Image (cartoon, helix red, strand yellow):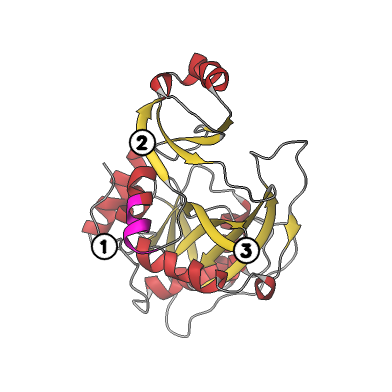
Amino acid sequence: MSRSGPRTAVRTARTARTVGLLAGDVGHPLLAACSEILQAGGHRVVAAGEPADVLLLKARTPQALEHARQVEAAGTPVLNSAASTAFCQDRVAMAQLAVEAGLPFAATSGPVRLADLAVERPSVVKSRYSRRGDLVARVGGADDVRRLAETWGEEPVVVQDLAPAGGWDHKIWVVAGRLFAQLRHSELAAGPPRPPRPLAVEALPVGYRDLALTVGEVFGLDVYGVDVLDVGGRPLIVDVNAFPGIRGQAGAPEALAALALAAAEGRHTPRVVAVGAAV
């Protein structure tokens, strides 16, 4: 339960609903606040595995995805869908689909085993499969690759050019079409880390709002995050995340609770990526 004070309850005029949570940490601030709102409105929040009218899928393990697929097959809506969640774990598939859709996505090469990687200019190396504790690192040459290979030598990775973006990322989160934003100091930037900066959605550069909404359509996501760099005044997407944490964003728990109820009541059908799930 959130201790940040009372929140607005989300009520339904017809019947109470049951919302299931499938997450590595059901006490995550976003989920805890969302649960508080739902419960205050007379709804139930249960752990995955119990009967529910809708399942919120924040976990991304193979076991969680398989459970979500079974839930969907039984007729229960899942947010985000299992197919879309799995697809966004594969950074190779992500880059290919983004390019096919005409999105300004960072040029991505690979996959290649990290120990076999040769880089000729400053680059960003990422695990092919996005997961908790995956590899995301800046490399400047062979010495950096050898250092990483001591721990990650067998890791399948992709490579993106290091974009000149001034060290700050535009973090844009979307919940059922509602946007939230923040400027975050890049983990790849030189120098000590800096705290994130608040960013009003209205202050996003021109075109970023429409770009973020298009990402949801392309990748079949209802709850997601988009990492965008400003490169010479033009946006460059470097990552898409299914069901991110969205910490400290006023209104995000309420938006998530409202989306969960809309899906539970049949007023919203979860999106599904238009291509097969990642391998």
The amino acid beneath tag 3 is Gly
- Name the side, left or right, on which 246 lies relative to 80: right
Q: Residue at coordinates 39% horizontally, 44% vertically from top-left?
A: 91
Residue picked out by circle 1 = 274
The residues tagged by marks 1 and 3 sit, at their Cα atoms, a distance apart of 31 Å
Specify whether 117 is left or right of 252.
left
Q: Residue at x 40, y 62 (%)?
A: 221
Label 2: how many residues lie within 10 Å, few (<14), some (14-19) or many (20+)?
A: some
- The residue at which mark 3 appears reads as 233
Q: Secondary structure at mark 2?
A: strand
Query: Tag on residue 48?
Result: none
Q: Residue furthest front?
A: 120
Magenta highlight on residue 270 = no
Residue most extreme to the bottom:
13
Residue to which mark 2 is pinned: 110
Residue 148 in the image, given as x and y percentages of width and height: 53, 20
Residue range in magenta is 96-102
Q: Position of residue 55 (x, y in %)?
A: 39, 59
Sequence-wise, which precedes: disc 2 or disc 1?
2
Q: Quadrant of residue 17?
A: bottom left
Please state which of the two labelled residues, at mark 1 or mark 3, is closer to the viewer.
3
Using a 10 Å C-alpha cutoff, classify the residue at mark 3 as few (fewer than 14 neighbours), some (14 to 19) or many (20 or more). few
Identify the amino acid type marked 2.
Gly
Q: Secondary structure at mark 1?
A: loop
The image quadrant where one finds the N terminus is: bottom right
Residue at 48%, 18% in the rendered image: 149
Could you tell me the amino acid type at mark 1? Ala
Q: What residue sits 52% from the left and 16% below the top?
A: 146
Position of residue 97 relative to residue 254, above or below, is: above
Of badges 2 and 1, the one in the foreground is 2
